[in-house]
Image (spheres, rainbow, N blue to C red):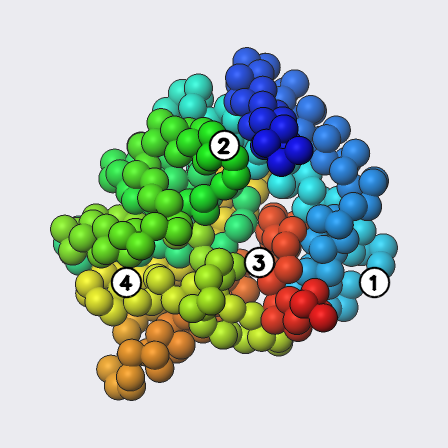
Amino acid sequence: MGKARDRLVDGLYGLGWAGVKKLPEPAAVALGRRIADYAWKRRGKSVLRLESNLARVVPGAGPERLRELSRAGMRSYMRYWMESFRLPTMAKERFGTDVRINDDHILREALASGRGVVVALPHLANWDLAGAWATSHIGVPFTTVAERLKPETLFDRFVAYRESLGMEVLPHNGGSAFGTLARRLRSGGLVCLVADRDLSASGVEVDFFGSAARMPAGPALLAQQTGAVLLPVTLYYGPTPKLYGRIHPEVEVPKTGTRAEKTSVMTQAVADAFATGIAEHPEDWHMLQRLWLDDLEERAQ
């Protein structure tokens, strides 16, 4: 049964990549919206979890407002997928015209310094489109890490897709990933990591919208060990251009404290930058899983 389900999941994603990219853009947009609205109306676990997460981000929102936000959130989430299926066939010129990253001089200057740059992002809007902008508009390839998915063929699809956009993709559960990232940074390279949800037992506890959550230690540790610049980046959808982003100021390594203490301070600073972007555009935060520690503990009981 498990293998049959894996084949089905892989086949559906394959159909998406093969079929959606052939649709005219307005048709793909309309299809994504219909799928999002259907999923939202079903009120499944993912939608309910999204609403629960949004309730923490917008604490004054009542049930009606949360339903509006979750509907917009599902539409944003499906917009990400429709765009991602089409990205490999999109004209590269559009990466410059459809994306506007505010304060991109911060990234350019950091790269010019030769120190290497770690960009940390939350699950906001379309981080793949932002990555395509970086490779084409900034002209710098970068390395990222992807969660190893099941079935393996699906993970391979994601790797091939992101590599087609100019990214080097490392599996998350490989022990050599950190060392490879460090080598890329020491040579002055760019590393981009989605970092608002911890996937290991070594995450750093942070205060996030007033409650405890865990976020990955990797960005802070890489900056400490390699001397790289650590830059939080937040994204959001807009009308024209399609994707906006903000590069936040560098998160500097504290001058005093143990490595663990420095990592904690730096990860909290990253979390604070993420919170700023998410609070401004909560409908574009695609967090359909449990994140806060008390939610995780509740599931474990």
Residue under numbered circle 4? 222
Residue 258: quarter of image = bottom left
Kindly check if marks 4 and 2 are in contact, taking CB atoms under 8 A apart as contact. no
Quick check: 54 above or below 169? Answer: below
Residue 157's spot in the image, x, y percent? 45, 29
Choose the circle earlier in sequence order: 4 or 2.
2
Task: Specify the quadrant that holds the N terminus.
Answer: top right
Question: How many C-alpha atoms fall within 10 Å of the one at disc 1: few (<14), some, or many (≥20)?
Answer: few
Residue under numbered circle 3? 278
Question: Marks 4 and 2, Cα distance to the nearest angstrom?
Answer: 28 Å
Which mark is in front, 4 or 3?
4
Quick check: 191 above or below 90? Answer: below
Question: Residue at image x 30%, y 67%?
Answer: 221
Disc 3 residue type (three-letter): Ile
Question: Residue at image x 34%, y 50%?
Answer: 174
**Dot 2: element:** helix
- Residue 62: which disc? 1
Choose the circle earlier in sequence order: 1 or 2.
1
